[in-house]
Amino acid sequence: MAQKNTYREDETYEDNFDIRHLLLAGAYIKKYLKGMLVAMLFSGIAGMAALVSPIITRKVLDEAVPAGDYKYLAVLVTLLVAVFIIMVIFATIRSRMMVNVSQNIIYDIRKDLFAHLQKLPFQYYDDRPHGKILIRVVNYVNSVSDMLSNGLINVVLEIMNLIFIVVFMFIVDVQLSLVVLCGVPILAVFMFWIKNKQRQAWRDVSNKNSNLNAYLQENIVGARITQIFAREDENAGIFARLSGNCKKTWMKAVAYSSLVWPGIDTISVFVRAAIFIAGLILFGAGQKSLGTIVAISSYASRFWQPIMNLGNIFNGFNNNMAYLERIFETMSEPVTVDDCEGATEMPKIRGEVTFENVHFSYEKGKEILHNVSFRVKPGESIALVGPTGAGKSTIVNLVSRFYNVDSGRVLIDGVDISKVTLKSLRSQMGIMLQDSFIFSGTIEDNIRYGKLDATKEEIEKASATVCAAGFIENMQDGYATEVKERGSLLSQGQKQLISFARTLLSDPAILVLDEATSSIDVQTEKALQQGLNAMLKGRTSFIIAHRLSTIRNCDKIMYISDGGITECGTHDELMAKHGDYYHLYTAQMDDIA
C-alpha cells in the first residue's frame, strides 16, 4: 500500500484582524512620518497641477479656438506644458523619497524581528519548522514594507485627490457632476462584497507558501537522508502537492483581486456614457458648451482613477495583511526566559551548583523532573546517566537557564540564577552539545566565536589541547580554511573537536558536555582524554555520555530516572549497590565484549 503523503499545515488565525498589529506597525511609520508628510506635500502639488489641465483645456476649446486667438492659445499650451513639467518633477522627488522610507522600514522591522528571534526560548524553535520562521524574516517583511509606506500615503493622497476632483467638477458644472456621483453607491456595495473573500483568500496563500518554504528548507538540510533512504519520489510527491496547493490558493486569490479593477472600470464606463448622453442632450438644448462636456468627461475619468488606485491599494492591503499578522505574531511571541526586573550581574563563578526542590515540565501535565534536589561542590565533575528522555539534558539546560523551572530554585554559589542577567550567567559557562554547530566562515572564526578578542596563539593552544590542531594545520589554508554552512567540509568528529576548542577558549567556570564525544572515534577520544582532563581541572562540570567507560573517573555519577535522581555516588559505590547503574554498566560492557 502506498504511503499517504502528509505535512503539517501552518498555524490558523482568527478571522478578525487584531488591531494591535496595526498599532505595532504604526510605531515604525511614526519614525519616518516627517519624510512621509513631505512626500505627501510633493504628491499634492503634482496632483493639483494635474487637476488644472482640464480647466486649461476647456478654455482652449471654448475661448481660444473659437476666437482664433493664436497668442492666447500659445499661452494656454505653454501653461499645459509647465503644468506637466511641475507634475513630473514633484512626482519623481516624491517617488525617490518613498523608496528611501520603504527601505528604512524594511531595515527596522527586520532588525527588530531578528533581535526578538535571538531571545526566544528553545521551545519556540522546537515547535516550528525553521523554514516558516525564515520566510517571515525575508519574504513577508519585503511584502509589507511598501504597504506601510507608499500604501498609507497613497490612501491619504488618493482620498485628497478625489475630494479636489469633486470640488473642481462642481465648479465646472453641478448637473453633470451629480451624474458622475451616481456610480458611487454601486461601487460601495461591490467593494463590501469582495473585501472578506479577498482577505481570507490571501491568508490561505500565506499559509500554503509557508508550508512549501518549510518543507523545501527541511529537505535541503536533509538531502543526504533523502538519498540514503531513496525517498526522492515520495518527497517529490509531497512537494508537488504542497506546490499545487500554493498554485490553487494563489489562483483563487488572484481571481478575487482581478475582479476589483474590471468592476470599477465597468462602473466608470457606464457613468461616462451617462455623462455623454446627458451632455449631448443639454448641449443640443444649448444649456452646455462642448468645453464643459469635455472638461467634465476628463474629470470623470480622473474621478474614477483614484478610486481604481484605492481599489489596487485595497487589493495590496488585503494581500499583505496576512503577512503583517505573521510578522507581528512572531514579534509578539513572549520571551519566557529573560532578565527579570532588577536583575543583577552574576559574580565571578566558583562553581557550587544547588537544585532545591526543582519541578519542571515541557508540556503542562507531563512533568520531566519531580522535586529534584542535589548539591555539587566547586570543581566537582558530575556524570548524568540514565534512559533516554529521563531528564539528563533537562538538568543541564536548567543550570544554563535555557528554561525556567516550574517551581523550586537553581542556585550557583548560593545565588538564584533567575535573579541574574542571562549574559553574565552564560558568559561564564561552556556548553558542548552532541550536534556541534559550525558557522559559515573560517575555522579560526568558529573557534574565536565565544571570545572575540582571543589571539592567534590562544586559538592554537586551545586547539592543541583538544587534539584539533593536527587536522586543522593539515588543511589547505590551516586556521584560515573556509568552512561552508554547518561545516559541510568537516567530519562530525572534526566539528566536535573544533567545538571543544571553542569551548575551552572561552575559559568557562562551569562546563557542560552533552554527548560531546559521541562522533569522535575511540582512538581520538583516548588522545583527547588528556585535553579533557585539562578542561575539567578546576571547573565544575556536568557530563552526559552513553559510553559509560568515559565517565568512570567522575567525582559523582547520578542515575536519572522516573523524574528524579534514583542513585548517586562514585562508579565503585554504584557498582557495589547492584542497582540501576550496575545493570546499565554491565549490559554495556557485555555488548562491547
Image (cartoon, rainbow, N blue to C red):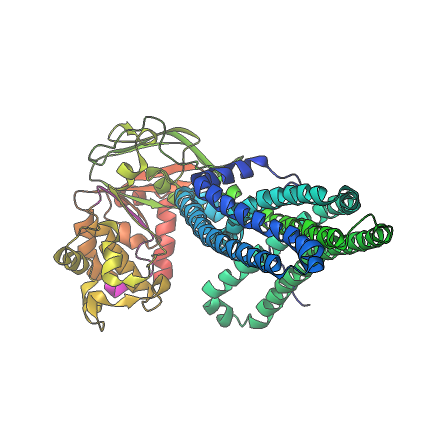
Would residue 188 appear left or right of 4 to someone viewing this image? right
| Above or below: residue 535 compared with residue 520 | above
Please identify the quadrant where the C terminus is shown: bottom left
Please identify the quadrant where the N terminus is shown: bottom right
Would residue 23 appear left or right of 502 to someone viewing this image? right
Residue 79 falls inside the magenta stretch: no
* Residue shown at the point (29%, 41%) measured from the top left: 426
Q: Which residues are magenta?
A: 508-524
- Residue extending furthest top? 342
- Residue extending furthest left? 457
Quadrant position of residue 379 = top left
- Looking at the picture, tell me which residue is in the foreground, 117 or 556: 117
* Residue shown at the point (67%, 50%) measured from the top left: 311
- Residue 267: x %, y % from top left: 78, 52
| Above or below: residue 29 compared with residue 135 | above
Look at the image and tell me whether residue 401 can be seen: yes
Residue 518 falls inside the magenta stretch: yes
- Looking at the picture, tell me which residue is in the foreground, 122 or 300: 300
Q: How many marks?
A: 0
Quadrant position of residue 401 = top left
- Looking at the picture, tell me which residue is in the foreground, 558 or 172: 172
* Residue shown at the point (35%, 44%) measured from the top left: 578
- Residue 231: x %, y % from top left: 55, 70
Would residue 467 appear left or right of 360 to someone viewing this image? left
- Residue 61: x %, y % from top left: 70, 57
Would residue 587 appear left or right of 473 to someone viewing this image? right
- Looking at the picture, tell me which residue is in the foreground, 373 or 399: 399
Quadrant position of residue 73 = bottom right
- Residue 200: x %, y % from top left: 68, 48
Look at the image and tell me whether residue 521 can be seen: no
